[in-house]
Amino acid sequence: MKEMMNVNGKTILITGAAGFIGSNLVLELLRTNAGVHIIGLDSVNDYYDVSIKEYRLNQIEQLASKTQTSTWCFIRGNIADKVLIEDVFDTYKPDIVVNLAAQAGVRYSITNPDAYIEANLIGFYNILEACRHSYDNGEKGVEHLVYASSSSVYGSNKKVPYSTDDKVDNPVSLYAATKKSNELMAHAYSKLYNIPSTGLRFFTVYGPAGRPDMAYFGFTNKLIKGETIQIFNYGNCKRDFTYVDDIVEGVKRVMQAPPQKGNGEDGLPLPPYAVYNIGNSHPENLLDFVDILQQELIRADVLPEDYDFDAHKELVPMQPGDVPITYADTSALEKDFGFKPATSLRDGLRKFAEWYKEFYM
């Protein structure tokens, strides 16, 4: 088990703070830690329904207003804006940086590649440079950079479950290529400038107030309108669905345990660098997933009990950039942090369906 540092009193910069994982991480830190100072940064772009991002930010504002010892400050801006990032680091001097800001989605990377280069490469480079210069003039600097990677980096690897020891040199989408690039860039900066950094490969995150471009959310929107949902690879896909609370718990533990600094035989720093999978380690067949989703939508009164589900589904071929299975080997996470995601798909989809009813109906 790794030794955890106390984050109380620390200044934590969370980029993508209006995003799905980012907002839930902010809420968790405000609930469970006394005296944390959280700086949230997000461009609040319109890649998907902005009202959901505003809803998340409103939840944070409400909780922060009741919290006596911790502080919350939100900055609306883009990590690709180098001057802004430099200013944020100069002004707030974060102890911990959690970079969750990114352009997400595999299919969108085919139609709008520019967004991925801007956010995932240029934006992440700006974060790395700011971390590097946080040590200038003898300053204490950033103690730990944690950043989002993705299970997409595994591409169409045949070996399952996916291990962080696996070779991941064959991305099948630009999105995956940018996430693998993040890991390579972070490794270089860890080696050159002794910046403790940890990449987290997230596996199909879902839950209340999630991303509308994700399958469970998009399916629900279409079923309510009486439209047909398309189930790719004729339903023969498996996904390691991971509930957002489990992802957040993993991030929270990892951010408190930066990789240790040390020197190699050559006297030069060994890169204080790590990568972990965070997934449920239980791939679900897409057809089973859709069946559970339908049951929970009926249970929550989002869909009527006599809904003709079969009339609204269509089995279609695999999409470009998609992979047939995602499956996380989380043994390293369990060994180092004593944590394994455990929320069942039914429990997670039940919470989503109840939230959906409350938010939309």
Image: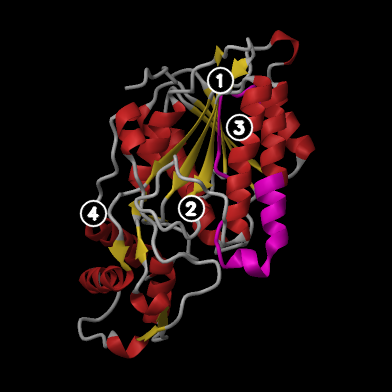
Q: Left or right: where does residue 186 sit relative to residue 159? A: right
- Residue 339 drawn at (x, y percent): 29, 34
Q: Looking at this rendering, what residue extends furthest in the bottom direction? A: 311
Q: What element carries label 4?
A: loop
The residue type indicated by label 4 comes to Ser
For mark 2, what is the residue? 154
Quadrant in which the C terminus appears: bottom left
Residue 94 is a magenta residue: yes
- The answer to whether one can see residue 337 in this image is yes
Gap between marks 2 and 4, in whole Å? Answer: 24 Å
- Residue 15 drawn at (x, y percent): 58, 40
- Residue 128 drawn at (x, y percent): 67, 32
Q: What stretch is highlighted in magenta?
A: 92-121
The residue type indicated by label 2 comes to Tyr
1 or 3: tag closer to the N-terminus: 1
Q: Nearer the viewer, mark 1 or mark 3?
A: 3
- Residue 6 drawn at (x, y percent): 41, 17
2 or 1: tag closer to the N-terminus: 1
Gap between marks 2 and 1, in whole Å? Answer: 29 Å
Residue 66 is a magenta residue: no
For mark 3, what is the residue? 187
